[in-house]
Amino acid sequence: MALDEALMARARRTGESVLRVYAWSRPTLSLGRNQRALGVYRDDALASADIDVVRRPTGGRALLHHREVTYSVTAPSTADSLGAAYERINEILICALHTLGVRVRVAAPAERAATPTSLPCFAEPARGELTVDGRKLVGSAQWRDRGAMLQHGSILIDDDQSRIPALMHAAVAPATPPATLRDILRRAPTLDDVSDALFAAVRTLADAGADPLVPDDALTRDAAELAAHYRSDAWTWRR
């Protein structure tokens, strides 16, 4: 999370856009920026399942990062609407997923992000998110601040999202299981498979000369300074 916000600061500084693709070293529940967490999740259940918790700078609802691929896009923000930015990023996601052999549909025009209720992120598609047979495959959320934007998203390899209700104090209505790449493709693509497809889509649709990012001193410094904020319980459990 610290590196993603540091990349957002870099976008302000340089005017450049960056697509980052990554996985998580251990199962981690990430909470949306404005989502209520206090009294919602069971400390004992999180501890027994060895699940960490972080709060994203972006909005949306809780999701469990484990057998999935996370992406972030950082860029200077423009006068374009939130929906227009989602659509441009969706074009890249759709192209990459098509390369992998997955046909997706956009849930509906993106006008706003999902409201920050206690429902898990993948319980239902929000407007503008990508689905297969009506089930969400990619969940995304965006944040804009001081001339820059950050969009986070998660592409499911397997369904770990169905574990989230067992981590909560109050029961939630059973949700339709989300779509997963394993179910669709009958195999589990690797992180490299997904990232290669995404980067190829960037070069096809956005910037034919896009190169891997070489971190500079300012990016490294900003990420290090922000890390304490994202490790802080005052941030993670702020509401």
Image (cartoon, rainbow, N blue to C red):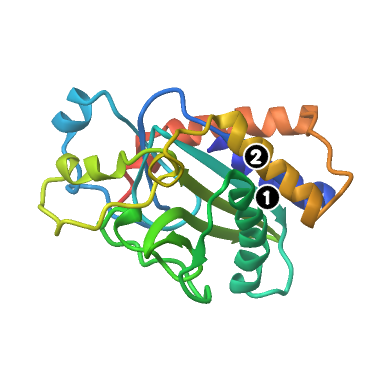
Position of residue 180 measured from the top left corner of the image (x, y, whole percent): 40, 45
Q: Earlier in the sequence, mark 2 or mark 1?
A: 2
- Name the foreground residue: 91 vs 110: 91
User: Pointer 2: what residue?
Assistant: 20
Q: Residue furthest right?
A: 209
* In contact (CB < 8 Å): disc 2 and disc 1: yes
Q: Of the numbered discs in the image, which one, if any, rests on residue 193? A: none
Viewer-proximal residue among 3 and 70 = 70
**Mark 2: which secondary structure?**
strand
Report, in whole angstroms, how far the alpha carbon at label 2 lies from the one at label 1: 8 Å
Position in image of residue 102 (x %, y %): 53, 51
Inspect the image, locate mark 1, and give the three-letter code of the amino acid beneath it.
Thr
Give the left or right position of residue 151, taking residue 231 as reference. Answer: right
Which residue corresponds to the image point at 60% horizontal and 71% vertical from the top-left? 82
Q: Residues within 10 Å of mark 1 (few under 14, many from 20)?
A: many
In the picture of the structure, the residue carrying the numbered disc 1 is 74
> Of the residues shown, which amino acid type is indicated by label 2?
Arg
Query: Residue 185 at x, y = what percent?
Result: 46, 42
